[in-house]
Amino acid sequence: MDEVQKVSNEEEIISKIRHYYPTDSKMLEHAFLFAKNAHSAQKRDSGEPYIVHPMGVADILIDLGMDITTICAAFLHDVLEDTQVSEEKLIKEFGTEVCELVKGVTKLDKIIFKSKEEEQAENFRKMFFAMAKDVRVILIKLADRIHNLRTISPLSAERQQAIAKETLEIYAPLASRLGLSYIKCELEDLSLKVTHREIYDALVDEVNLKRAERQEMVNKIIKQLVEILNELNIAGEVSGRPKHFYSIYRKMTSQHKAFEQIYDLTALRVIVGTVSDCYEVLGKIHTYWKPVPGRFKDYIAVPKPNNYQSLHTTVMTNYGSPFEIQIRTFEMHKIAEYGVAAHWKYKESRSGQSDLDVRIGWLREVMDMQGELGSSREFLESVKVDLYSGQVFIFTPKGDVIILPEGSNPIDFAYNVHTDVGNKCVSAKINGRIVPLTTPLKTGDYVEIITSSNSKGPSRDWLKYVKTSAAKAKIRTFFKKQMKEENIKLGKDILDNDLKRRGYTAAQLFKPAWLETIMSRLSLTSIEDMYAAIGYGGINTSQVLVKLIDFYKKEQYTATKEFKTDERVHDVNNGVIVRGQKDLLIRMAKCCTPVPGDKIIGFISRGRGIVVHRTSCPNIKSMEKERLIEVEWANAESKFFANVQIIASDHSGLLAKITNVFAEQKLSIGSVNAKISKAGKAVMNLSVKVEKITDLDTLFQKLRQLDEVDEVRRITN
């Protein structure tokens, strides 16, 4: 990588533009000044003018050698999101291509999401869509992330941690997958500086302390490698590259080693003209120094998924410490350093299927399958598997190599070979032995898939075991296309069962307007499609029911709000007022038998109108709060039965004395139930018809004046 000179002010960025893009400098200067004017009223968290950020992003992409369209979009990448500039204005000034790149890195700021996680996932899905159309979108986004990390200090500690975590989970692996080694290393180091600042500072100090003593050793080994090239009469270059801090940190944590135990702090690189030169130099190195067993990797014969090619070997030198040596051609080195950016930096031809198409083929495959991946979160998780899972290298019966994520099994392998091979797969052999289809694959395994024309297709259980998003999508596609009627029936049964489990019915939740909203969100066109999608596993019942239940509860809540209007409606039979409602069925709760004068509250029951409870009723605590409503007693004269319990000393004539009190108060007794307790006390439960609570208060006072009566109280049943 050439030495990068970062710009620090406007004069420097203009000078850099004129130096690297002499024929297009006017357009780039126009983009810079347009962005500066659009962001003129904005400041960064540091207090600097906002234009500092777009300027920094463009600077990074200039160093990558990107084309004029990308640099223009870099200057303008925030104008649609953060300023009043419209798409029409952007197209008029800079053309459709620039506008599409800017839109590709613009967040979904006009959509309301249930959670921050859902919003993040949908933004990533949008970004990947744009990237599949034009990979320059992600180059701008990666440069944007680098500059934000370089200038992250003014943000809160919590926000810094979130950005660094997201970078390590998504952006650094994505840069690696695209072959952008230079960007990947800086993203990881800047993130480590945030997530583990003390460890980062300690590594910087340790590496600086050892730099001088190691440099002498590195220089000697470089000299010996140059002698090997001269001896073989091979033209080439030899250099030493210090490992970046995150790489050292990851090795320390994964191998549980102290810094002093990490020997390969510098990787030596030999760059030659041809592939045959690479292997010839490797052979000579292994005769010169002893290779460390298990540390040789041939990425020339089997390139990494990002098209990286190189020979890696670790040898024990004469100085008693191991050194990693990488051997590659100049063309391989270009790809290793710049990845997809080499397409522009080295002005590669765009005719036919270029190296660029090969490098991002995995991305386009994911996007082709994304329609079968359900929610945005599921899409993001599937992409993560493809981005940073370790790889295993598997051999086909013909000797071809297939690269799969670590943890993949023969089902993943079968679908990678061909969709029909996966759909008709009935068993598999690994290294000549029949094994279960869920057996994890290891690097070097030789896999043979056994198919049958009589196979009815994949099992639904396979969705639980496959690792790759492509396999999951192809299995779902099979069930979607081949078994629609069965899927509709199965999906309806699944949804009905979940409805019952949650305590709702289809009549309550399946209102046309609500269903239309759900189906639009899930990209479905009919209720049959919804049932089918549930049946084949494309969506789950929660994606449908949670929102429908939310609609239902909001409707119920709105209904309770309407009860609080000024209009009063009196239910003559039960003497209870519910505001804003007419012709309601109102019943007294049998559990607490409220009477006028009691503090009361109403409960909206399903299909049974409003049930009135005393506010002290213990059952209120277990009821849904959104279905409780305010009610009050009417002034009209209505009579209610109240339940009363009397405990008294048992003797002849007791019942007559008690009923005489009721008669004096002119209260009717509806029923009497009397018994003698084990303690010899008479226990009488009576229902008495009263108009208001004061009738009961007077009755209780009179009863307590009787010498025989020990206790009088209301009971709830």
Image: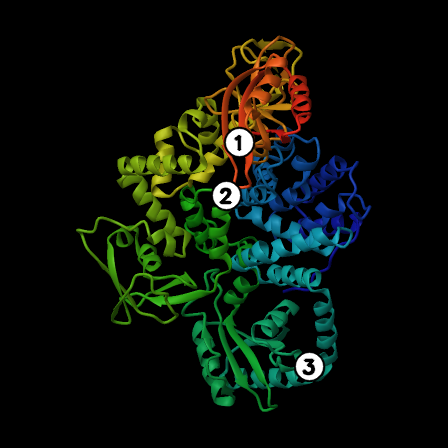
Visual colour scheme: rainbow
User: What residue is pinned by disc 2?
Assistant: 376
Residue 59 % position (x, y): 69, 52
Which secondary structure lies at badge 1?
helix
Q: Describe residue 320's horizontal placement relative to residue 464 as left or right.
A: right
Contact (Cβ within 8 Å) of mark 2 with mark 3: no
Camera-side mark, 1 or 2: 1
Name the residue type under label 1: Asp
Q: Distance between the Cα atoms at labels 1 and 3?
A: 66 Å
| Disc 2: CA contacts within 10 A as few (<14), some (14-19) or many (>=20) | many
Which residue is more in the foreground, 591 or 357?
A: 591
Which secondary structure lies at badge 3?
helix
| Disc 3: CA contacts within 10 A as few (<14), some (14-19) or many (>=20) | some
Q: Which mark is residue 215?
A: 3
Name the residue type under label 3: Gln
Camera-side mark, 2 or 3: 2
Which residue is more in the foreground, 265 or 587?
A: 587
Name the residue type under label 2: Ser
| Disc 1: CA contacts within 10 A as few (<14), some (14-19) or many (>=20) | few
- Decide which of tag 1 and tag 2 comes sooner along the chain: 2
Residue 169 location, quadrant: bottom right
Give the residue displayed 73% in from the left and 72% down from the top: 202
Which secondary structure lies at badge 2?
helix
